[in-house]
């Protein structure tokens, strides 16, 4: 069996790093949610309603979504992470904080 020199070991290490980075990038691209999915998640958490405001912020390779939703006399502020997780939710009655 032929022994690997330093250059061969470095080439293998660089190849492994490139493969790991490409796999990580592909995973992020496949697992992140798009705006339509984020809206559906927000509406399902609030039992439906009307989205009255939305904000999208970029965090690296994915976006984070914030929505204000009114459902009857209740308002909700909900934050959805780039992978679809609920990062925060607040609610209250319409007169307490939210104004049309």
Image (spheres, helix red, strand yellow):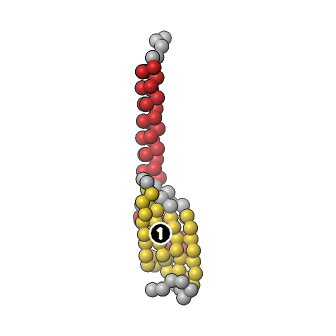
12 in relation to 97, above or below: above
Q: Position of residue 12 (x, y in %)?
A: 45, 26
Q: Is residue 18 visible?
A: yes
19 in relation to 69, above or below: above
7 in relation to 15, above or below: above
Corner quadrant of residue 34? bottom left
Q: Which residue is mark 1?
A: 66
Q: Position of residue 19 (x, y in %)?
A: 44, 36
| Label 1: how many Cα within 10 Å (few below 14, some 14–19, many 20+) | many
Q: Position of residue 22 (x, y in %)?
A: 42, 41
Q: Position of residue 61 (x, y in %)?
A: 42, 53
Q: Residue at x 47, y 69 (%)?
A: 66
Q: Residue at x 49, y 77 (%)?
A: 69
Q: Residue at x 54, y 83 (%)?
A: 97
77 vs 19, left or right, is right
Q: Residue at x 49, y 80 (%)?
A: 70
93 vs 12, left or right, is right
Q: Is residue 71 visible?
A: no
Residue at the top extreme of this rendering? 1
In this view, the residue in front, 79 or 38, is: 79
Q: Judging from the image, what secondary structure is the residue with disc 1 in?
A: strand
Residue at the front extreme of this rendering? 6
Residue at the bottom extreme of this rendering? 95
Q: Which quarter of the rendering shows the C terminus? A: bottom left
């Amino acid at each position: 069996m032929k022994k690997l020199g330093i250059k061969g070991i470095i080439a293998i290490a660089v190849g492994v790093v490139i493969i790991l980075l490409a796999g990580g990038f592909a995973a992020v691209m496949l697992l992140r949610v798009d705006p339509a999915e984020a809206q559906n998640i927000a509406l399902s958490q609030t039992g439906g309603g009307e989205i009255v405001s939305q904000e999208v912020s970029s965090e690296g390779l994915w976006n984070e979504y914030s929505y204000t939703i009114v459902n009857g006399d209740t308002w909700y502020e909900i934050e959805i992470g780039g992978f679809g997780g609920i990062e925060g939710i607040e609610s209250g009655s319409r007169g307490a904080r939210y104004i049309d």
